[in-house]
């Protein structure tokens, strides 16, 4: 699972590094969070295609899902592009898909937290419970991208799904945490996988603009930063016969 692709530098880093990583670790399935792929905010048709061509099998989103208008049509057309499953009924697109990988049926889902995110989505915990009940018997492995701000909400989700998910991996904060582990009942867990994109930045955005805004409190348009880049990911070794994780390994490459 690769963390939030930020703008063109993130897309290019993915294009250069995902292929070699897939070969080196014999990766069967790559899930990539693309909610910041289009200039830092949302996703478009061409940026989605670029992520697929870089080697992603499933692309997940988050609070920036609908920043670009064309995401509405794209979500309805692309079954492997996921938005958080806890949007209220009637929202475009879908929050999960089932994909064949490494001889297993893999359920991949995206959910979004509600703490410190200014959106009124449905309960992500109940949303995931409902999904697992609905898809029972149709999948061997289950990977959740939990896009959330609060570490508490993410840890809670990890424990809520321990023994029922192959992996619960947090996204959104853009800073990789060091708490990767397999929980006691077999679920791989990481609070936040981190960001893929410009490393000499504030969360991927040009640092001058962000620092200036903190100093002046005047709203400013943020641009994706340029320069050196990083890739953030979590490698999960999973057993389709149990549906659980055997091992996890954090990946952080900085140029
Ligand atoms: Fe986000």
Image (spheres, grey):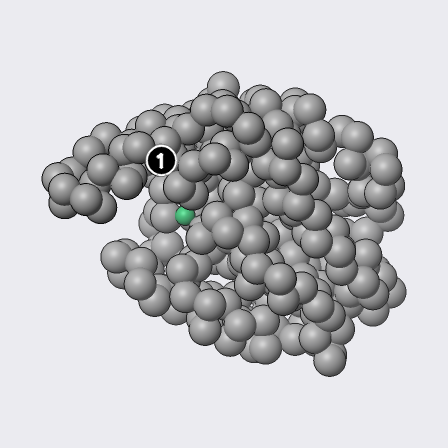
Vertical placement of 235 versus 9: above or below?
below
Residue lying at the far bottom of the rendered structure = 184
Q: Is residue 153 visible?
A: yes
- Helix, strand or loop at label 1? It is helix
Q: Nearer the viewer, residue 146 or 213?
A: 213
Q: How many marks?
A: 1
Horizontal and vertical percent position of residue 183: 70, 75
Relative to 26, 210 lies left or right: left
Q: Residue at x 26, y 57 (%)?
A: 118
Vertical placement of 22 versus 239: above or below?
above
Residue 209 image-quadrant placement: top left
Horizontal and vertical percent position of residue 6: 48, 34
Vertical placement of 61 versus 240: above or below?
above
Q: Nearer the viewer, residue 175 or 41?
A: 175
Q: Residue at x 70, y 48 (%)?
A: 251
Which quadrant holds the C terminus? top right
**CB at disc 1 and ligand 1 closer than 8 Å:** no
Residue lying at the far front of the rendered structure = 215
Q: Is residue 137 visible?
A: no
Vertical placement of 45 versus 249: above or below?
above
Q: Residue at x 62, y 62 (%)?
A: 178
Horizontal and vertical percent position of residue 126: 46, 72
Relative to 106, 103 lies left or right: right
Q: Nearer the viewer, residue 120 or 15?
A: 15
Relative to 7, 56 lies left or right: right
Query: For mark 1, does the 10 Å Cα neighbourhood hold few (<14), some (14 to 19), or many (20 or more) residues?
Result: some
Residue position for label 1: 207
Q: Residue at x 46, y 68 (%)?
A: 151
Horizontal and vertical percent position of residue 253: 67, 40
Residue 132 image-quadrant placement: bottom right
């Amino acid at each position: 699972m690769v963390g939030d692709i930020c703008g063109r530098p993130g897309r290019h880093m993915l294009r250069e590094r995902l292929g070699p990583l897939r070969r080196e670790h014999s990766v069967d399935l790559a899930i990539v969070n693309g909610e910041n792929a289009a200039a830092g905010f949302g996703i478009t048709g061409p940026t989605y295609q670029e992520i697929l061509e870089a080697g992603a099998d499933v692309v997940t989103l988050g609070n920036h899902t609908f920043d670009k208008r064309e995401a509405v049509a794209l979500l309805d057309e692309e079954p492997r592009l996921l938005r958080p499953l806890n949007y209220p009924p009637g929202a475009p697109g879908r929050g999960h898909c089932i994909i064949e990988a490494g001889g297993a049926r893999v359920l991949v889902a995206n959910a979004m937290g509600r703490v410190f995110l200014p959106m009124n989505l449905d309960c992500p915990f109940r949303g995931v419970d409902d999904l697992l009940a609905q898809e029972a018997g149709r999948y061997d492995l289950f990977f959740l991208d939990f896009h959330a701000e609060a570490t508490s909400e993410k840890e809670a989700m990890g424990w809520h799904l321990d023994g029922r998910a192959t992996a619960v991996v947090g996204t959104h904060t853009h800073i990789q945490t060091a708490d990767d582990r397999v929980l006691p009942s077999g679920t791989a867990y990481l609070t936040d996988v981190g960001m893929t994109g410009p490393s000499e930045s504030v969360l991927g955005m040009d640092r001058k603009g962000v620092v200036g805004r903190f100093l002046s409190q005047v709203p400013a348009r943020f641009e994706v930063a340029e320069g050196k880049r990083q890739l953030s990911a979590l490698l999960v070794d999973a057993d389709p016969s149990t549906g659980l994780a055997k091992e996890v390994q954090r990946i952080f490459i900085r140029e």
